[in-house]
Structure formats: structure tokens, C-alpha cells
Image: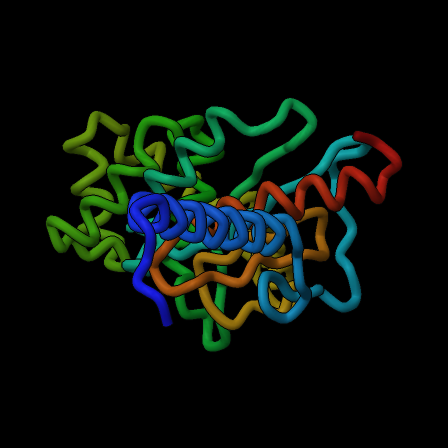
Amino acid sequence: PPPPTDMEIRMHPLKNLIGLLAAAACLAFAGTAAAQELREGRDYTVVNPAQPTDAKGKIEVTEFFWYGCSHCFDFEPQLHNWTKTKPQDVVFQRVPALFPGDKGLAETKLYYTLEAMGLVDKLHQEVFTAIHVDRVRMNDEATMLGWLEKKGVDRKKFADVYRSFAVQSKVQRSKQLSQAHGLDGVPALVVQGKYKPIPTGAVYADVLVTLDKLIAKARAEQGRK
């Protein structure tokens, strides 16, 4: 072939740049389309049958967790930040998961006692830290009560609530909910009693992106924008 002209030599880098920009645009478009598309089995699973919710006229998001779960500990700060910016039509609740053989029983009772005493906001993250950083055995009642006492909690009052019928009723409800939602691990999020985002390893930000999309899906199913 004939040698390239001066113009062709000058245009060669520009052609490469145009080609690269076009390829990047195609990739960006493909990435955006993939990000917008929710696929059952890849991004989320469906709870069957769907479970009733208490948040009438709103969208309910439930987190199932266990204080002894290291993944729940890692996820908690990001989830906490999400709750601060969640849409106004979303109601968020936590449920301490209870597994076969009553694994997690002590921690479930601990959470519901904190809830009954209005101490969740103050001590929820601190319980995680105590277990996973300081290695405090919260499943041992005496150790747990000693730790709480150091946090300024009335030991006797806490123990009374911890052993109360009200907390025991919550524990039974937790067991029922854990079974009804078909939990196979925690942390687990459920949107409107029927959609569970599928976690992608330890990339919890991806789970929260999927969560927001499932909220939008639930909102659309309610005929709202």
C-alpha cells in the first residue's frame, strides 16, 4: 500500500481517541442498563409466600441480624448511614434472627430488652463492638449484666425486663419471622415482606443499591412513584 500522507499521520491518534471514546460510551451505556435492571435470582430472591407487613401505606424494610455475626458487625455502620437518608415512605425495623436449636437466643433477648428500655440507639453498635472487638461473652448472662452495668444501665431493672413475659413473647415472634422469611444466613434484608437482596460477598454498598431498587419496585407495585 502507498505510504500514509501527512494528514493521515496527523489523524491517526485522533482516530484512536475517537475509537476509545466510543468504546467507553458503549461500556458506560451497558453498565447503566445493567445497573437499572433487577433480575430475580441474581439480584434478589422472593419470599414465598410473601409475609404481611405492619407499615400500612408505606414500604417496610426489615433487617434480620445476629449480634454474634461478624458480617452483621461489618455491615452495621453502612446500614446505619442508610437509615439516616432512607426515603420518607420507608419504615425500617430490625429483627434479631433466631436459628434452629435456639442459636442466638441470649442475643435476641438482649436486643429486645434494649428495645423495651429505649436503649437501642445508645447501645446497639456498642454491643457489636463489645462482642467482636473486646470479645465480651454476651451469651453469658452474668458477663452481659456486668458489661451493661459499666455502661450505666440499672442491672436489676435490665435483668427483670430480660426475663419478662413481654421479651419472651418477642423472642417467639422472632423465631416465627426467621422461619417464615426462609433465612439462610444474616445479615438479611427484606423489602415489603417479599424481596430479599442477594449479598455480593462483603461489598455491602452493592446490597444497599439493590435495596433502593427493590424499594422503588415495591413502590411502583403500590401504584406510587
Q: In the rendered image, is residue 105 in sight? A: yes
Q: Is residue 184 above or below residue 92?
A: below
Query: Residue 15: horizontal and vertical position, in percent?
Result: 40, 49
Query: Residue lying furthest bottom in this view?
Result: 101
Q: Indicate whether 136 appears above or below 99.
A: above
Residue depicted at x 26% and y 29% = 153
Side of 121 relative to 221 (left or right): left
Tell which of 89 and 128 is nearer to you: 89
Q: Which residue is farthest left?
A: 134
From the image, which quarter does the N terminus lie in?
bottom left
For residue 163, say whether it is visible.
Answer: no
Decide which of 142, 129 is in the foreground and name it: 129
Report the coloring of the rendering: rainbow
- Name the side, left or right, on which 135 lies relative to 118: left
Q: Determine whether 30 is above or below 218 in the image.
A: below
User: Which quadrant is the C terminus positioned in?
Assistant: top right
Q: Residue shown at 59%/68% (left/top)?
A: 42
Q: How many marks?
A: 0
Vertically, is 128 above or below 198? above
Residue 117, position as x, y percentages in the image: 43, 29
Name the spot of residue 33 as percent of width and height, x first: 62, 51
Measuring from the top left, give residue 64's x and y in whole percent. Answer: 51, 54
Q: Residue furthest front?
A: 2
* Residue lying at the far right of the rendered structure: 223
Q: Residue at x 18, y 51 (%)?
A: 143
Looking at the image, residue 154 sits to the left or right of residue 78; the answer is: left
